[in-house]
Image (cartoon, rainbow, N blue to C red):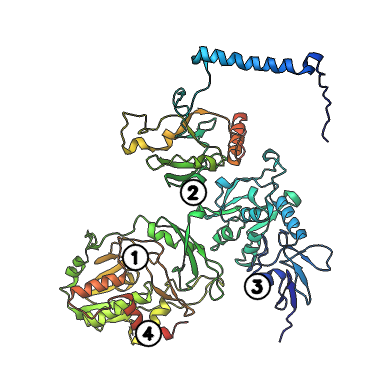
């Protein structure tokens, strides 16, 4: 049993963990201490001085982020002395701040604004013309824009590049009040996790070039979902307004991710690409959104000659719908899962070697429902039903029904599919955590795979197909598939 | 330190100190006005509002036409911060932000006000941190006094170009405008350093 010091914060007694800092202990117990430089996933710098707290018997105020708790400590986080210190620290930080909030993308989620309203509220004693000027916008890398004027030198970005990506592109140049964040010569800030810097920057110094001026943050609504960029399956916050997704942020959690890679953040762009499919295409002819045309296209084929490939791009529910359609409506035995790549974290942070989000999920389905793993790719079928990415490797030449987000020159019926920002579904990541996507935006010009299968089942004259997603859930639990999930 | 200034008050003379003659003189003024108003009522300056109204020239009382002020170089003062669109209770302001070359970085690519929805509350003017949007006296099309108004969308939908004010001025208010001024100044001097 490790040593558990008892400390008092604002008159209340708490049991702290060993080697915990005051800030962490307070945070765990619901007391918020303002901070700029402290970040739970980075090392402790203690340079912003915003988290100063009063500790009994200590002559000076101490930084809560770097002071380790000790037995019998008596901490005051909101005494008059602390309040005054915060006010003064804030005045220093804002001394040369350009106050260009109207043109700053951070406005609305800026720590300077928040703490000014909470602790500052002091009129600036430095007039706008006397402020020290530094460089305004400067593009560093593909995704980031640096504004040195707004920077408060908390060095979160420097520490991120040193400790998380280990690329060390950024450093603090010069000394004293001349210091500013700079990039090392002849490098560019293009590491695959660069946009996290825009997230962790507490002020508007680093902002995202992709999100730049597109929307004010107070208009954005947030839904929690998961990233489908690879098999890691990070939890994300999708921020959207007026039926448009504007950006994706990580939703830090202990199981999978604290950060989010740039590739994952850009996955929403596929929805808004010019190639986005919004009508059914059969043999290069456009057919609007009439699923009967798809039925006309496949009704002549003998059901035994149709093969269904479960797809690691589709959710568990959609894969079950595909399986059930093949086994109960078509009554074919040609249900396969494609051979799937190995799953492991490639770079030690997040990026998985498997680009598909649901490989583990369909492996579980295949085990439980005893499906064949297809090694004989040369075997020909008259018609293949699957997602387009799988069809590209397994059914390059055959006819088929392919579900796709974007246009393609493939031979067959290509059905516009709802992306998983527009549709809900369960995905199982490489650690076997089953997580659900949520509907962030609505799209009327595409189908979910389940919708298509349901309609085709009706047209085939079958009445035993699932009537709703609830039936699929029942099917999943009755076959014991969800027992494998974490 | 508060400065103290001594003021000498003139002493009253004997005639004033007797008091009664001054009261009679005051009553005399009142009576003079009474009789002049009685004999010549048209000279009374007071009007009995609201029964009587004096019309001001033009639409001087109205503040219903939105304007966006321009800087000296003709660019709009607006920096598309969306505060007016945020506070607007009628949700009638639609702004799209874009990026410019000059110091200000941000400008409204699109700035539309749907006047058929506007409730003329003036909150957009209050909210503007750059003093860019104002409301002035020009009659809006379809207003009460505009008898020949067409109620079409074009008349009531003020686009960026229609909102721009003709007058150009040096702007001092707001941080972004300060940046703009520095930019203009450096351009005048010919040493642009961004």
- Camera-side mark, 3 or 4: 3
- Camera-side mark, 3 or 1: 3
Q: Chain of mark 1?
A: A
A219 or B145: nearer the viewer: B145
Q: Chain of mark 2?
A: B
Disc 3 and disc 1 on one polypeptide chain: yes
- Camera-side mark, 2 or 4: 2
Q: CA distance from mark 4 to mark 1?
A: 25 Å
A133 or A89: nearer the viewer: A89
How crowded is the residue under tag 3: few (<14 C-alpha within 10 Å), some, or many (20+)? few
State left or right for residue B184 relative to residue B160.
right
Residue A481 location (% of width, % of height): 39, 84
Please say whether residue A183 is visible from this viewpoint: no
Q: Earlier in the sequence, mark 4 or mark 1?
A: 1
Q: Which residue is mark 1?
A: A418
How crowded is the residue under tag 2: few (<14 C-alpha within 10 Å), some, or many (20+)? some
A403 or A102: nearer the viewer: A102
The N terminus of chain A is located in which quarter?
Answer: bottom right
Q: CA distance from mark 3 to mark 4?
A: 38 Å
How crowded is the residue under tag 1: few (<14 C-alpha within 10 Å), some, or many (20+)? many
Which secondary structure, mark 3?
Answer: loop
- Camera-side mark, 4 or 1: 4
- Tag 2 and tag 3, C-beta contact below 8 Å: no
Q: Chain of mark 3?
A: A
Q: Chain of mark 4?
A: A
- Tag 1 and tag 2, C-beta contact below 8 Å: no
| Image mark for residue A477 | 4
Q: Which residue is mark 2?
A: B86
Q: Earlier in the sequence, mark 3 or mark 1?
A: 3
Residue B156 higher or lower than A177, as above or below: above
Q: Earlier in the sequence, mark 3 or mark 4?
A: 3
Residue A96 higher or lower than A15, as above or below: above
């Amino acid at each position: 049993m490790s040593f558990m010091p008892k400390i008092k914060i604002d008159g209340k007694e708490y049991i702290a963990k060993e080697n915990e800092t005051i800030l962490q202990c307070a945070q765990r117990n619901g007391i918020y201490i303002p901070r700029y430089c402290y970040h739970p996933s980075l090392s402790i710098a203690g340079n912003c001085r915003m988290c100063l707290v009063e500790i009994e018997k200590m002559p000076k105020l101490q930084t809560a982020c770097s002071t380790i708790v000790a037995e019998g400590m008596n901490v005051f986080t909101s005494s008059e002395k602390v309040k005054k210190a915060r006010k003064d620290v804030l005045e220093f930080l804002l001394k040369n701040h350009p106050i260009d909030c109207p043109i700053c993308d951070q406005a609305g989620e800026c720590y300077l604004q928040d703490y000014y309203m909470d602790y500052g509220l002091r009129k600036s004693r430095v007039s706008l013309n006397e402020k020290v000027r530094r460089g305004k916008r400067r593009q560093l890398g593909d995704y980031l824009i640096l504004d040195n004027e707004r920077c408060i030198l908390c060095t979160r970005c420097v520490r991120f590049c040193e400790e998380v990506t280990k690329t060390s592109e950024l450093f603090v140049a010069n000394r004293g009040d001349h210091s500013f964040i700079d990039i090392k010569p002849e490098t560019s800030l293009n590491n695959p996790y660069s946009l996290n810097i825009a997230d962790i920057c507490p002020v508007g110094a680093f902002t995202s070039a992709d999100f730049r001026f597109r929307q004010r943050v107070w208009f954005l609504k947030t839904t929690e979902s998961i990233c489908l960029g690879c098999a890691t399956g990070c939890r994300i916050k999708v921020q959207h307004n007026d039926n448009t997704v504007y950006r994706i942020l990580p939703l830090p959690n202990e199981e999978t991710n604290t950060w989010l890679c740039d590739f994952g953040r850009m996955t929403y762009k596929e929805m808004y690409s010019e190639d986005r499919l919004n009508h059914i295409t059969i043999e290069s002819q456009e057919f609007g959104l009439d699923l009967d045309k798809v039925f006309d296209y496949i009704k002549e084929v003998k059901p035994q000659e149709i093969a269904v490939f479960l797809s690691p791009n589709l959710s568990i529910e959609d894969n079950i719908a595909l399986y059930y359609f093949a086994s109960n409506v078509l009554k074919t035995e040609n249900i396969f899962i494609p051979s799937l790549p190995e799953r492991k974290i490639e770079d030690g942070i997040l990026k998985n070697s498997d680009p598909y989000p649901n490989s583990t999920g369909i492996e579980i389905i295949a085990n439980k429902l005893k499906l064949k793993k297809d090694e004989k790719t040369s075997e020909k079928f008259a018609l293949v039903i699957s997602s387009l990415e799988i069809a590209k490797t397994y059914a390059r030449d055959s006819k088929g029904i392919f579900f796709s987000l974007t246009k393609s020159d493939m031979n067959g019926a290509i059905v516009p599919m709802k992306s998983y920002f527009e549709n809900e579904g369960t995905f199982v990541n490489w650690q076997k955590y089953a997580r659900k996507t949520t509907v962030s935006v609505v799209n009327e010009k595409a189908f979910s795979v389940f919708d298509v299968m349901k309609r085709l089942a009706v047209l085939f004259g079958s009445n035993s197909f699932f009537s709703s997603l609830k039936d699929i859930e029942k099917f999943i639990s009755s076959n014991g598939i969800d027992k494998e999930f974490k | 330190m508060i400065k103290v200034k001594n003021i000498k008050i003139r002493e009253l003379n004997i005639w004033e100190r007797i008091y009664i003659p001054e009261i009679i003189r005051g009553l005399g003024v009142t009576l003079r006005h009474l009789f002049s108003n009685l004999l010549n009522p048209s000279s009374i300056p007071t009007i009995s509002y609201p029964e009587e109204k004096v019309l001001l020239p033009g639409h001087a009382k109205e503040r219903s036409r939105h304007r966006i002020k321009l800087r000296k170089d003709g660019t709009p003062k607006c920096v598309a911060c969306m505060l007016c669109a945020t506070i607007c209770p009628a949700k009638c302001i639609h702004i799209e932000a874009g990026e410019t070359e000059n110091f200000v970085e941000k400008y409204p690519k699109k700035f539309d006000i749907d006047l058929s929805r506007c409730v003329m509350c003036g909150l957009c003017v209050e909210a503007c941190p750059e003093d860019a949007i104002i409301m002035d006296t020009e009659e809006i099309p379809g207003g009460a006094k505009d008898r020949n108004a067409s109620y079409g969308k074009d008349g009531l939908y003020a686009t960026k170009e229609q909102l721009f004010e003709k007058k150009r001025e040096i702007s001092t208010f707001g941080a972004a405008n300060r940046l703009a001024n520095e930019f203009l100044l450096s351009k005048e001097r010919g040493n642009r350093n961004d």
